[in-house]
Every structure is written in C-alpha cells, then in structure tokens.
Image (tube, grey):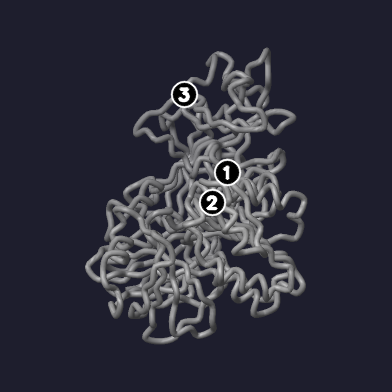
Amino acid sequence: MKIVVNARNGPRDFECAPGEKILHAGLRSAVALPYECGTGTCGTCKARLVSGQARSEWPEAPGRRYLKSEAELLMCQSVAGEDCTLEVGASLREPEAPAPAARAGIVRAGRRLTHDVLAFDVELDRPLDFAAGQFALLTVPGIAGARAYSMVNFERDAGCLSFVVKKKPGGAVSEWLFASSIEGVRLGVFAPLGHATFQPGLRKHVLCIAGGSGIAGMMSILALASRVEHFAGWDGHVFFGVRTARDGFFLDELERLRASGGGRLAITVALSDEDVPASLVSAYPGFAFARGLVHAVAGERMKDRFADVRAYVAGPPPMVDASLRLLLREARLPPAEIRYDKFS
Amino acid sequence: MGQYDRHVFVCTSGETCPTQGDTERFVKTLRDAVRAANRQADVRVNKSGCFSQCGHGPMIVVYPENVWYAGVQESDLAEIVTSHIVGGCPVERLRYDPGVKGANKVDVGETTAAPTPASPAWKRVCAVGDVPASGMKEFVVGGVGVLVVHTGEGFVAFQALCPHEAVPLESGVHDGCALTCLEHMWQFDLRTGAPMGDAETGLKGYPLREEQGQLYVAL
C-alpha cells in the first residue's frame, strides 16, 4: 500500500506492508517521520488521515490524549487498510542516523545488576548499524505492544545489543524479564530509533544527566566518545542519579571510562534517598559523590561551566523535565544542544 | 464530489468579522492569489454571511478539509493560499478549534461602538498578582486561551497552545527572553512571538495593558 505524508515542506511517499505500522514503514524507507517514543505514549507521531483507511492497533494508547479529532491517529500504533494520505504538522528533515529495520533477536546472558535492575543481551539475526545513544523497540512473544530500551553498547555493525531494564511492578515486559528464564527466547527488534545521539567530531563538552536506567544510552555515548578520544580535547561531565548506594550499577564500567579519559571525564554519583556511605566513596576514589536529586546536583556543580556544552538527558519523566528546565533556564543552552528521547 | 477542489468562504457580512479586518479586501486578495496560481478553475472563493462564531474573526472556512481559520490577518493570506488552498496543507497556527460544537459567539463589547483594529475591545484577563513573578499562566478569555508571561520586567500575552502539537505552553519554560515548549523544544522570542531555532511558526501575540493592578488583552 502506498502512504503519502503531506508535511509543511511538501509531500513524501513510501510503501507500507499489510500489518506494518505506518511509522515503521516510513522510517525504514528513510522518510524522517516525527516520533519520539515509538510506543504509543508521547503523541509526537500524530498525523491526520486525509484519505484512505487506517486503524489503531492500540485504541487505549496514552498518546491518544494528544489527538484532537477522530481523523487523527498515532502513526506508531496504526496500520493502513488501503492507500492513505496523511498530514503532519511539521517539516520532515533529512534522516540523521541509519534507517531502522525489523529484525529478529535471541535473548542471551540475562544477569542482575542490582535488586531491581537487569542487564541482558540480544543476539541479532543480522548486524545493525546505529548511532550512540539510540534505542530499540523490543517485542516479546505473547505480550502486546513494543517496549523501548536504549542500547548500552556501541559498535559498528553490531551483532549483539546490550540493554538494561528496571523492574517495574505491573509492567508486563519488565515482569516477564525478571520472572522467567529468558535465555534463548526470540524477540522482535525494530531499530535503531532515537535522536539523542552522539556523533564523532562533535566540537562540544559533553554533559550527561541520567537517572537510574537512563544511564543506558549514556554508556553507549561514553563508549564511543572514549573510543574516538573525544575527552582528549573536550570535557565530559556525567551525573548519575540513583536512590541509594545499593541502587548503583555500571560504576566499574564508568570508572574504566573515567580512567581512560585522561582526567577530563568527571563522574558524579548523586544519591537522592540517603547520605553517601563512606564505603562507596572509598570504593570509587576517582568519583565525586553528592546527596540530592541528580538535576539539582548537576545544576550546582556545573554552574558557570555551561559554555560550549552538549547535554544528554535520560531517566524518569520528572527527572527529565526538571533537567530540561535547568538546561534551558539556568544554563541557557540552545534547544539543539539538549538531546533527550521521551519514552516512559 | 463537489464542483471545486477547494471552496473558500470568507465572512464579509457578519456583525464582527468585517470590523476586525478588511474582509472585502481579503476576498479580493485570495481571488487574485488563486488566479496567480492558475487555480481559478478548481478553487472558488465566496463571500459569506455569519458563521455564528462572532468575536473570533476575521474568519475563513476552507472545504473539503472543513478547516476553520480564526483571527486571520491580511499578512496570513499568502500562507493560507500557498500552504492550504494550493498546497493542501492547512495552516495549523491559524486553525480555529474552540473545543465546542456549533455556535460560539463571544461578547466583543458594546456593539454600538464595534471594535476596530485601531480601538480593540480590551478584555480583563486577571489581576497582576495572578501570574507568578517571572512565570506564566494560562487564562481563558472569551473562549480563547491566552498565555500571560511575566518576563521579569513586564507582561506579554500570546496564544496558549504551541503551534506545533497544540501543547499548553504554560508547562514550558521561559527565561525572560525566550519561551520554550518542553514537548519538542520549539522556542519563541518573547518580545515578538517570532519562531527561534527549530520552531517553524511563531506565536500569535495579543496587545496587553495594565491598569490599576488588572491585566487586559485585546483579542
């Protein structure tokens, strides 16, 4: 079926297979349709159906609260019944990252990082090229809908993607990951997605503000930045917020990145719910620690150091919101230098 | 199918639209532009009577999309023609969407002295103290959402919803110079409402005045 999308800067068209989400069909054809979460939550991919028939596969999607009429739909949840013409509110840009595609994957090596954070790898049926900081949509057999997880690793033509997931009571996929034996299970993978990317050659200091499992995409960014020796010429500031010392993870990996960063990569761990235990300080003498909410700690320690900064933000929505306010109002960063993807 | 690809109605004889803009000239401008685009055979521009939305004018309706435009200024006409009437892509920032069906007249003051662009009908929005210092707040004035911003130095008023995805700008951020919608980082100049950075269209601003601790806007 042919889908035509009228944008402010003109029409684009692409082919859509039966049962395929309209968003996925456009993105895999390198049409940079608007989206953020890809999972029916954020409303960014809304479009107006001008002609043709399309139906939502998830009529209760929370992102539908952004729709204003019956003619509007979320492209990430909709499949076309015939040739369709859609209209979106903004211009379509040139795609920045490799076009995503549907793949199959097999779960490998699930392991606990903390009492409520799990890491797992997904072995792909064919290699995937992605930009550092991007995410994938994973579909679990028997559970409706896709979930978005950021890649932790970074490599060209990756045969394997690494993810972390935080236990979310009531979250079907999260509970499945924690409860079952997941080794060897086949998953649907649609990737890569996301705009919060780091590209080698960036001429900026890098600031990462992450809460909990939001550190995942930052690990990918730091891995690449470190590999291209970004921190030889520019500073790196990582602020990682967790509730208590027992909620921390990836600290050894962050220490390795810091140690290889030649002194310009600084790691600060913020604990929101307890004073910093002396044992943690002595275990990571190269880190800074603070008690407080991660955006507040970042705001305080980065004061007067926001010039030439590119900021990456990820974590729970209230933390992302507070960080964006800090970066716009206090730091006065231009929006183009603030990178985040909303999926929660 | 109708007789025309697009059928455009301009209210020229209601009670308020013609007082809120030179709508007779709007019709002429639109017809000239359609002719210039060589689309006069498939686009029809008609003068119309009242749409029963008085106070939101000047108002233009375009079919078959059934798109209603409110508060249209002469300077908006070229964009309506290029983007929508010829291009098929409605101009979202002008779209009328009051959230109620049917008639939706608002009081535009004494009808004996109908408001004109030169002496607009001022409407009370709120008390000065209702807007947080260096903050912003959304109000509904005569059925229209109005965002009042305290820049630190004074007050300015704009449309309440972001022209991008119609998200309330009240939940965004401003620093006295720029207003940013947190939804997708569209940014606007608080002096003029002009788009900055990624934003593709600006904000509609409303004249605002302060009198005895009260704020008034002209819609």
Q: Name which residue type carries label 3.
A: Val
Q: Does any portion of residue A262 appear in the rendered image? A: yes
Q: Secondary structure at mark 3?
A: loop
> Which residue was labeled with disc 1?
B28
Do tag 3 and tag 2 residues touch (Cβ < 8 Å)? Answer: no
Residue at point 62% right, 20% down?
B129
> Which residue was labeled with disc 2?
A320
Disc on res. B106:
3
Q: What chain is tagged by disc 1?
A: B
Please provide percent x and percent y for residue B58: 53, 34
Check the image and report above or below for B172 versus A282. above
Q: Secondary structure at mark 1?
A: helix
- Find residue B114 and report its image quarter: top right
Other residues around mark 1 within 10 Å, as few (<14) / some (14–19) / many (≥20): few
Q: Which tag is nearer the camera, tag 3 or tag 1?
A: 3
Q: What chain is tagged by disc 3?
A: B
Q: Secondary structure at mark 2?
A: helix
Check the image and report above or below for B196 versus A186. above
State the count of labels.
3
* Foreground pick, A282 / B101: A282
* Foreground pick, A301 / B208: A301
Please provide percent x and percent y for residue A225: 64, 74
* Foreground pick, A288 / A93: A288
Residue at point 50% right, 64% down?
A249
Please provide percent x and percent y for residue A118: 39, 66
Other residues around mark 3 within 10 Å, as few (<14) / some (14–19) / many (≥20): some
> Gap between marks 2 and 1, in whole Å?
50 Å
Q: Name which residue type carries label 1.
A: Lys
Residue at point 46% right, 42% down?
B46
Look at the image and tell me in which quarter the N terminus of chain B lies. bottom left
> Gap between marks 3 and 2, in whole Å?
40 Å
